[in-house]
Image (spheres, helix red, strand yellow):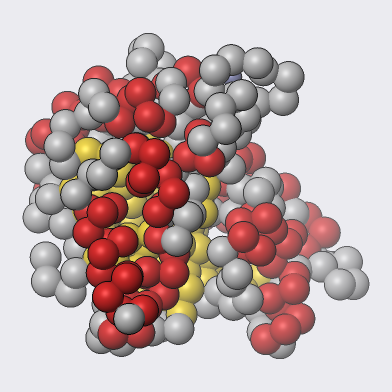
Amino acid sequence: MLRHNLQFIERLLSEKAPLEERAYFSKINNEICRFKIRKMSASALKFTFLGTGTSQGVPIIGCDCTVCTSTDSRDQRLRTSGMVSFGNKNIVIDTGPDFRQQMLRAQIDDVVAILFTHDHNDHTAGLDDIRPINFKHQRSMPLYSTPSVQKSLMRRFAYALGENPYPGAPRLTFETISEQKNFEVEGLEIQPIKVWHGEHLPILGFRFKGLTYITDCKTIDSDELGKIKGTHTLVLNALHHHPHYSHLNLTEALELIEIIAPKQAFLTHISHNMGRYEDVQKILPQNVSLAYDNLCLMIPDEV
Ligand SMILES: [Zn+2]
Ligand SMILES: [Zn+2]
Ligand SMILES: [Zn+2]
């Protein structure tokens, strides 16, 4: 009976049912994922959008626009972060200011690694809240990042990463990565992708088998685009409708999605100026969706 209901709900979600029904059923989407992950092979991937908002989050403090005052939960966005799960292991991408709330909301009590796309505050400010995981599992947290992000983290979290860590500070270990070399976390191969966050700041996106996760991107060089080819699911940032010096806007993101041609694409790092979920979703191409917080996706084994 339970299985029958889950299949019914899953079909409603996938067939783009009326928006009110999708809003209702999105609340139990996580339950469906939990059910499906038990059936899938240990190597299958689940991806959870922990946060999908731009640096101020949505709603913005003091803003009374139609998005910030919307009662649709899909318009309420914590700062951008994602989680890849396989077997019973979770890898988190970026620890923004909402990291603690995101772990509690998704009911996560263990993370095996953190990957950093870049060092901006909306992607790193929550790192201190890794402590309960340190304490519970009695191990240090590996941080996968470039040398320049490591330098920045050492400045931002000097009390934990300096020479004399403060007692009780988070226990963190650096793992150096670059776009030139794939790396493994707990047996999962990860391919870093260099993307440009504006003209002068190279940052990383990541490919995990059929899933590619890119945020805070403005442009991608053609040789790096080759790494993304054939991806089943693409997560890509789209800020709003106007030009921005360091982020793709909606038009630019849709152009890039057309070039990459994934089976499905989800937009993240969204500003309140993008508009309400319900309105924007209607104008997107068939294989593109606005992501929303807590949405989770199953990524097929085969690409
Ligand atoms: Zn607003
Ligand atoms: Zn940024
Ligand atoms: Zn950002």
Above or below, comparing residue 194 to residue 232 in the picture: above
Left or right, 128 with respect to 115, comes to right
In the image, what residue occupies the spot 16% across and 31% down? Answer: 285
Percent across and percent down for residue 126 are 68, 53
Q: Is residue 183 visible?
A: no
Q: Quadrant of residue 257?
A: top left
Percent across and percent down for residue 284 are 22, 29
Percent across and percent down for residue 54 are 52, 33
Above or below, comparing residue 101 to residue 16 in the picture: below
Along the line of sight, which residue is nearer the eye, 40 or 204? 40
Along the line of sight, which residue is nearer the eye, 18 or 229? 18
Above or below, comparing residue 136 to residue 224 in the picture: below
- Quarter holding ligand 1: top right
Left or right, 250 with respect to 277, comes to left
Number of marks in the rendered image: 0
The C terminus lies in quadrant = bottom left
Above or below, comparing residue 266 to residue 284 in the picture: below
